[in-house]
Amino acid sequence: HEITNTDLTMKKYIISIVSDRYAKDVIGGGASAKAPTDVITLAKEAGYEEIVLKINAAARKISQYLSLIFQLHKVSKLIEKGSEVFFQYPHINPSIMPLVMPMFRSFKKTAIIHDMNSVRVCGALSATEKRALSYFDKLYVHSENMKTFLADKLDKRIEYRVIGCFPYIAAPNEEERKASKQVVFAGNLDKSKFLQSFIYCDSLLDIFLYGQTKDESSFVGRADYLGRFMPDDIQHLKGSWGLVWDGESSETCSGYYGEYLKIIAPHKFSMYIAADLPVIVWNKSAMASIVGKYGVGVTVDSLKDVDNEISKYMNGSSYDKLVNNVRCFAKQMMKPGNMFNDEK
């Protein structure tokens, strides 16, 4: 709605950037709106007021940037000085942050990090992203490892809050999970190069794949390709285990993607948890500590170890305990206070 001085009466605001690009998101096709939408939902429950900015996805990038700058300038003039303004990073392109953030000099600027593209793609925080993140007074980061990574590079005045993993709001799973060697992987299958060696390894695993791929036939005979699905529609996911892995190798999570897993909380981790699926994670990933602390899955050094590790839970009762742990953790994960209560 149109922003007016009388509309904005609270002292905590969350910026929401809406684009029609997200209208047809599916798992494997990006699912890029799911995590931000869930964060907004929980922020509003925790007392933040949403300020919606709209951009035209069909417009040229320069037009989108100018539109955002204009709208943010308007917001900075209307809300009360000293208010907290919560951003989702990098929804505003880091390259235009020097034009945007000085407008909010008189506000407490907070951001939750969804992605750091320079670290994911190039293995290091770029000067552009370093400058962009340094504008904030408080950063919500995925893990203690991410906090350590950034604290060494950014302004020492910045306050950090570790979220552990992202919330995932969805209808509960409809089917009771049973102990089996059925392993699910959901995501961009063409990007996940490790799959080719994983599905052809000599194991007794049943592998279910969901997501985007240009060649479904490449999995025939070795895995069941089950298509794509909307991010909110996870009740019907098959299988007994959810796999979180990245990189080109099934031996280890190699390269920049592997290094990135050491600091991030992948959104698919939260999706599996919300679907009552115990997880399989790399033992050097940031999520390994959560798996160990809350008993929500297993950790492996290599995908060759998966069969052996999950075989320990085939007696039913031990697997049922894992599922119960997953359900308890999922309920905690979705509480507004879990993310926004500073007394946590």
Image (spheres, helix red, strand yellow):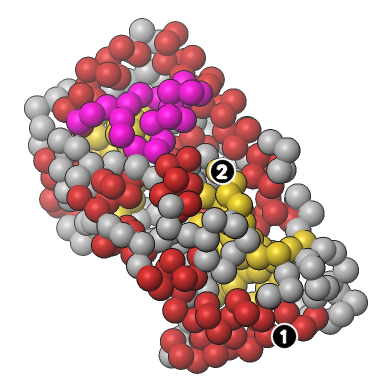
Measured from the top left, where is residue 221 in percent x and y? 13, 39
Image coordinates of residue 213 in percent, x first then y, are 24, 57
Q: Is residue 259 above or below residue 221?
A: below
At a point 69% along the width and 47% down the height, the residue shown is: 340
Type of amino acid under label 1 = Lys
> Residue 142 in the image: x percent, y percent?
49, 46
Label 2 element class: loop
- The label on residue 331 is none
Which residue lies under the disc numbered 2? Answer: 163
For residue 179, what is the image quadrant?
top left
Q: Which residue does the numbered mark 1 point to in the structure image? A: 74
Q: Say whether residue 259 is left or right of residue 319.
A: left
State the residue in front, 53 or 29: 53
Determine crowd level at label 2: few under 14, some 14-19, many 20+ residues with C-alpha closer than 10 A. some
Label whose residue precedes the other's in the sequence (1 or 2)? 1
Q: Residue at x 77, y 83 (%)?
A: 77
The answer to whether residue 182 is visible is: no
Q: Which region shows up in magenta? A: 283-302
Residue 101 is situated, as x and y percent measured from the top left of the image, at 60, 76
